[in-house]
Image (cartoon, helix red, strand yellow):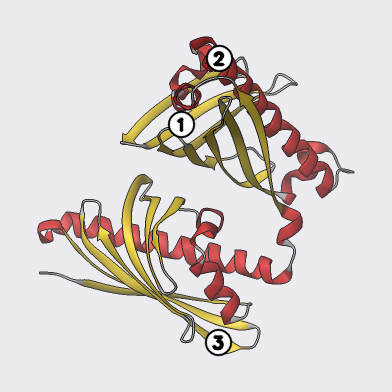
Amino acid sequence: MTIREVEHEITAAAPAETVFRLIAEVENWPRIFPPTIHVEHVERGEREERIQIWATANGEPKNWTSHRTLDPENLRITFRQEVSTPPVASMGGTWIIEPVSATESRIRLLHDYRAIDDDPESLKWIDEAVDRNSRSELAALRSNVERVHAETEADLTFSFEDSVEIAGHAKDVYDFINEANLWSERLPHVATVRLDEDAPGLQTLEMDTRAKDGSVHTTKSYRVTFPHGKIAYKQVTLPALMTLHTGYWTFAETDSGVTASSQHTVTINTENIARILGADATLADARAYVHTALSTNSKATLGHAKAYAEARR
């Protein structure tokens, strides 16, 4: 039985406790780690927890369940996959955060793993996935934790939500959002769409959307579905003004029907503000532009979902 053990490390200009907190709070992960699509708590205790993770490995969407033990005194988090996805037979490891100084820390990420049937090709695939994801995660963690520590994140990253009351059933509203393969027929702002369900409840969505000025934007997202209450997503091919776009659709039953909501979390790409909006444009202008564009599409989609669900009631 071949058990591979590897280690990756990076140094960040942020206190060790800040780094530990960002890794410990898994709701941060889709924002911090490029491979992570979505994370849900399955069980949660003070020091022990089980989490379900949806992420890409070598560009392929996967999902697994991990058990984590948090040790804030020693700034360590150990993890072990309970249910691994082929070709992984087992996978575990440890995050170790070491203070270098009051404002700097070393982040070490340890992995141990083996392949199903000790297959050499599978082991090579896992080697590449672990190496690529570890380097990507550590680099992203450093840039995010340094930005959070410098307190500029609040201006660049923001969240908002649009909601609509629908006199219909949650299942019908959910179906409308879930069946994105039909959006080019159902939504005027969607030109073309391609939807693949890579595994049950894990979708890849690529589409071209039309803006108010007639321009067409191509986006690619991974979506995780929770019938009939929520669809979470992460855009991986982004418009020029964003470096991050995650969100979720929620469908909450009410006495009179359903409250359907669309939530967005966005990070502005400051490098492209002048090119897209003009030399005099500010960060506030970019925030307003992105908010309006996303909100317009969300409200349009929710409006069509409302008409669809109410017609079926």
Element type at marker 2?
Answer: helix
Of all residues, the one furthest to the front in this rendering is: 255
Q: In the rendered structure, which amino acid carries the disc numbered 2?
A: Glu
Q: In the rendered structure, which amino acid carries the disc numbered 1?
A: Leu
Between 233 and 133, the one nearer to me in the picture: 233
Identify the image quadrant of residue 156: bottom right
Check whether the beta carbons of the residues at disc 2 and disc 1 lie within 8 A of each other. Answer: no
Image quarter (top left, top right, bottom left or bottom right) of the N terminus? bottom left
At a point 53% along the width and 14% down the height, the residue shown is 308
Please give the label number shown on residue 310: 2
For marks 2 and 1, the one nearer the N-term is: 1
Please give the label number shown on residue 205: 1
What is the CA distance from the residue labelled 2 to the residue labelled 1? 26 Å
From the image, tell me which residue sits under label 3: 99
Between 16 and 137, the one nearer to me in the picture: 16
Image spot of residue 66 (x, y percent)? 33, 61
User: From what the image shows, is residue 175 above or below residue 251?
Assistant: above
User: From what the image shows, is residue 261 above or below residue 138?
Assistant: above
At a point 44% along the width and 21% down the height, the residue shown is 181
For marks 2 and 3, the one nearer the N-term is: 3
What is the CA distance from the residue labelled 1 to the residue labelled 3? 41 Å
Element type at marker 1?
Answer: strand
Left or right: 251 as drawn, with respect to 290: left
At a point 49% along the width and 61% down the height, the residue shown is 26
Between 73 and 44, the one nearer to me in the picture: 44
Question: For the residue carrying disc 3, how many other residues have a C-alpha within 10 Å: few (<14), some (14-19), or many (20+)?
Answer: some
Image spot of residue 59 (x, y percent)? 38, 46
Left or right: 246 as drawn, with respect to 176: right
Of all residues, the one furthest to the right in this rendering is: 280
Check whether the beta carbons of the residues at disc 1 and disc 3 lie within 8 A of each other. Answer: no
Q: In the rendered structure, which amino acid carries the disc numbered 3?
A: Pro
Left or right: 200 as drawn, with respect to 262: left
